[in-house]
Amino acid sequence: MPKTKLDREFYTRSDTLVIAKELLGKYLFTRLDNALTGGMIVETEAYLGATDRASHAFGGRYTDRTRMMYSLGGTAYVYLCYGIHDMFNIVTGEEGSPHAILIRAMEPTVGIEIMQARRKIHQRTYRLTAGPGAMAQALGINVKHSGMDLCGDEIWLEDHEISIPDADILASSRVGVAYAGDDAGLPYRFRIRNNPWTSPAK
DNA sequence: ATGTCGATTTGCT
DNA sequence: GCAAATCGACATA
């Protein structure tokens, strides 16, 4: 089966919600510390830049932390949450448009022992990569990788020609964004129906 | 300069 | 099921 790395054109398209859905079933890999780890994306969440109250870039906010969100599509945006968790996002759209997609969970396929060691988990459990902080930790991603080009060879995505039918994509409201007012209820969280590797948060 | 709080996870009651 | 953990970004002064 053909496996092709997602190229710049995939990320620079303008419809972030479409990209967020298309990312389901794609594969995410990291080759960090000379170790290959990765798996299939099963849950994503879209943040629509300056017009989205839940986005860090709402209103065009531009700070040291959010600067990377304005990069060209296909750039990593990683930030620290609750002082503990590194959250991995994929920037989309053209340069200057601060859209991003949070990768919330994946089904691990490659380098499982390495991911277990990074997570200090030594049993087979869905907890390994369910939830954005847990998944980034398993992949070895941290805030130092913010701004990294996802068309390079340290963090990248691949199309394995798995397509998720619309009927198997569940859309629901985003998690942990109650502060976003009217935008909190928008159905921008997507996951694969009946996939046990999706994150536990409601 | 200082205070508040988060796009979460984990462990314990 | 609930609350602690933990620190830097951001807002306010």
Image (cartoon, coloured by chain):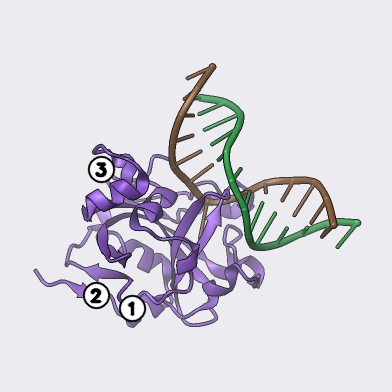
Chain colours: A purple, B brown, C green
The spot of residue A121 in percent (x, y) is 32, 40
Q: Residue at x 27, y 39 (%)?
A: A122
Amino acid type, mark 2: Lys
The residue under label 3 is: A194
Element carrying mark 2: strand
- For this orientation, the residue located farthest to the front is A33
Query: Which chain letter goes with mark 2?
Result: A
Q: Quadrant of residue A41?
A: bottom left
Q: Residue at x 18, y 62 (%)?
A: A162
Q: CA distance from mark 3 to mark 2?
A: 27 Å
Q: Nearer the viewer, mark 3 or mark 2?
A: 2
Name the quarter where the N terminus of chain A is drawn: bottom left
Q: Is any part of residue A12 visible from this angle? A: yes
Label 1: few (<14), some or many (≥20) within 10 Å?
some
Q: Nearer the viewer, mark 1 or mark 3?
A: 1
Ranked by sequence position, the earlier of labels 2 and 1 is 2
Q: Which mark is residue A5?
A: 2
Label 3: few (<14), some or many (≥20) within 10 Å?
few
Q: Same subunit under labels 3 and 2?
A: yes
Mark 1 near mark 3, Cβ–Cβ under 8 Å?
A: no
Amino acid type, mark 1: Cys
Mark 2 near mark 1, Cβ–Cβ under 8 Å?
A: yes
